[in-house]
């Protein structure tokens, strides 16, 4: 498996992989039932995250990961201000429910200690089941371990929780979709 740090030139490929990976996700498929809207949403987040050297791709978009480093932010202040209008444009009357979902993400995110945040990890559905996504995550974690830092993620699909646990993450909490549908697990991994 070939892993590399992404650049602006990888925005399209990574966005396509993540949109495909999350199209049937119990959380993000509910939030963005139209594939074009989900793709625009991930493009917004990946584009912002590319300001850090922590967006990776494995085997040229077979899988992708988006990390926010300690002290970083998922979006800039300007992007935060554009979030509600973007949601209104993408999903119309569904926007308030998705904004409530985002507030649940924010309120469940630990403040301290400083940590790496796995914002997104996805494998293209055509290549699932080969271990590519978990191998990419393991490679990312080895870089984080070399810095002696902890990490945090939210698992939007409970079928993946055991995969994260196998790499040292521990479930520390949960929250539900605004419609009480899917449950999101919050998971922490201590520094080595």
Image (tube, helix red, strand yellow):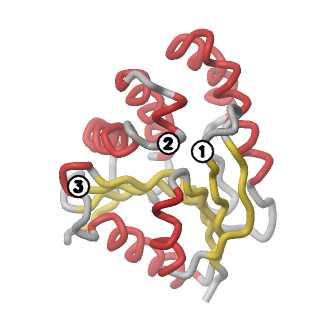
**Residue 19 in the image, given as x and y percentages of width and height:** 36, 37
Toward the viewer: 9 or 131?
131
Q: Are marks 1 and 2 in contact (CB under 8 Å)?
A: yes
- Dot 2 or dot 3: first in sequence order is 2
Crowding near the residue tagged with mark 3, few <14, some 14–19, many ≥20 C-alpha atoms within 10 Å: many
Residue that numbered label 2 is attached to: 26
User: Which quarter shows the C terminus?
Assistant: bottom right
Residue that numbered label 3 is attached to: 62
* Element marked by disc 2: loop
Which disc, if any, is residue 158? none
Q: Are marks 3 and 1 in contact (CB under 8 Å)?
A: no
Left or right of residue 157, residue 55 in this image: left
Q: Residue at x 51, y 53 (%)?
A: 157
Residue that numbered label 1 is attached to: 182
Question: How far, Cα to Cα, is label 1 from label 2?
Answer: 6 Å
Crowding near the residue tagged with mark 2, few <14, some 14–19, many ≥20 C-alpha atoms within 10 Å: some
Toward the viewer: 54 or 16?
16
Q: Residue at x 63, y 21 (%)?
A: 82
Asked where in the image residue 98 lies, by quadrant, the reply is top right
Question: How far, Cα to Cα, is label 2 from label 3?
Answer: 21 Å
- Dot 3 or dot 1: first in sequence order is 3
Q: Residue at x 48, y 27 (%)?
A: 32
């Amino acid at each position: 498996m070939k892993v590399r740090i992404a650049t602006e030139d990888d925005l399209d490929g990574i966005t396509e992989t993540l949109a495909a990976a999350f199209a049937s996700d119990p959380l993000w498929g509910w939030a963005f039932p139209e594939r074009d809207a989900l793709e625009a949403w991930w493009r917004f987040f990946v584009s912002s995250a590319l300001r850090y050297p922590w967006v990776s791709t494995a085997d040229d978009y077979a899988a992708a990961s988006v990390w926010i480093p300690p002290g970083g932010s998922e979006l800039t202040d300007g992007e935060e201000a554009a979030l509600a209008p973007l949601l209104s444009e993408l999903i119309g009357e569904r926007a308030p429910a998705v904004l409530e979902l985002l507030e649940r993400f924010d309120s469940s995110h630990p403040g301290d200690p400083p940590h790496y945040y796995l914002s997104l990890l996805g494998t293209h559905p055509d290549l699932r089941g080969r271990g590519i996504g978990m191998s990419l995550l393991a490679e990312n974690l080895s870089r984080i371990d070399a810095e002696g830092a902890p990490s945090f993620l939210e698992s939007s699909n409970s079928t993946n929780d055991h995969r994260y646990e196998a790499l040292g993450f521990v479930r520390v909490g949960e929250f539900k979709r605004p419609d009480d549908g899917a449950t999101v697990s919050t998971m922490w991994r201590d520094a080595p």
